[in-house]
Image (spheres, rainbow, N blue to C red):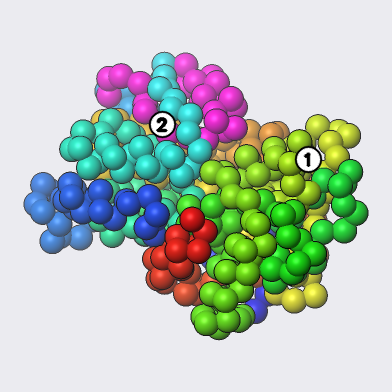
Amino acid sequence: MSVTRSTRTPLRRVAAGLLALGVVVALSACGSGGDADGDSGAAADVNKTWTSVDEMVAAAKKESGPLNVYIAPEYAPFVQPGFEKAYPWAKLNVTQLEPVPSVAKWSAELSSGFSQADVVFMHSTGVQTFKDLKALAQVTVPNDANVEPALQDKDHYSHPVTELGEVMLYNTKLISTPPKTVAELADPEWKGKVIMDSPQLGGAGGFVLASERSAMGDAAWQTWLQKVADNDLYVTDTSSASYAAVVRGDRPVCICNYGDYISQAPGTPVGVDFYGQDDRGIVVEPIVGTISKTAPHPALAALFMNWMLAADGGQQGFVDSGRVPTVPVPGADKVSLPEGTKVMNLYEDLGDYISDPDSANTVFKKIFK
């Protein structure tokens, strides 16, 4: 079942594992992290609900030291100065890492038994593993209510801050017409011409390739994946790296984020193709912020998350930088997917990937070495 988008982009919340990063092993080694009263994981988590900004400010001012945030380099330039301008008494200690290495760093810290992380941003595919292993705090902030209803995490372990349309971008100096469907990536015509982030890392590549599983059936899907790999697919660490390679002309086509296309400089020789418009449409997925259960500054972390979800705070920063917000922001239609774009229903079209991501990641790891 597909959905035709208007100026907003609703999306089901998704969660998947990070088998390739060894997160399950690392976090299991350090234990579940316990629960709110210090016991070893039997009791349910307690949802800390903040009812007002004044309440968060008063509590945060009692905490000492800067807030430790792991966030993608492309977000940091507007996030850090914006938050510190809104709250001049608050300081951020920003570690600039893309979602996958950010998660790897945090999981290694948890495994060692020492983590100072307060807030970690990740692909939505990382949430379920950390949630199951009790590494995440369950927190509700006032601006959670403003997030698109279909994106909201009803359990409040994650807070979607921006959404990514996974599209095909192509170098217009090298080709005039990119593949029109994902299935075509295995065709001989595209041998040595396609680049994407490594599928087992849970980003654009993983979501787009996994989206074909329900349509093809598992056996045919695995055969198709092998053909894609044998077609001299080039893999990178991040979608942004894939986009940069297409701009350079290393490969003519990438599976990339629509945000890279929207934010590129005028005259950049890169076009966009919304594949699958005669079928199920494109894949869309959110980037989320999470708060560590062992956060040294839980109140400041909540205040920061609330600002990230503010229409005149972090969400405006996303719009200004060419990225899609998850709450209503004036001018957001300029960065959202074009009206009428058909997108997949992730809950249905990627059901296996969402409910049992390791089954897909195991296949990805075997095929895309």
Residue receiving disc 1? 249
Report x, y in % for residue 66: 35, 21
Report x, y in % for residue 169: 76, 51
Residue receiving disc 2? 69
In the image: residue 24, left or right of residue 177: left
In the image: residue 363, left or right of residue 322: left
> Looking at the picture, does residue 139 appear above or below residue 114?
below
Crowd class of label 2 (few under 14; some 14 to 19; many from 20; radius 10 Å): many
- Identify which amino acid the numbered label 1 is placed on: Gly
Q: Which element is circle 1 on?
A: loop
Report x, y in % for residue 255: 67, 54
Is residue 53 among what the camera can see?
no
* Residue 223: quadrant of the picture: bottom right
Crowd class of label 1 (few under 14; some 14 to 19; many from 20; radius 10 Å): some
Identified at 70% across, 40% down, the residue is 245
Is residue 94 among what the camera can see?
yes
In the image, farthest residue toward the left? 39
Give the mark toward the camera: 2 or 1: 1
* Residue 150: quadrant of the picture: bottom right
Identified at 65% across, 44% down, the residue is 242
Q: Which element is circle 2 on?
A: strand
The span picked out in magenta is 63-88
- Identify which amino acid the numbered label 2 is placed on: Val
- Compare residues 1 and 328 and report the one nearer the observer: 1
Q: Earlier in the sequence, mark 2 or mark 1?
A: 2
* Residue 81: quadrant of the picture: top right
Identified at 59% across, 27% down, the residue is 78
What is the distance, in whole Å, between disc 2 and disc 1 at their CAs?
Answer: 34 Å
> Looking at the picture, does residue 8 appear above or below residue 304?
below
> Looking at the picture, does residue 300 appear above or below residue 40?
above
Residue 73 painted magenta: yes
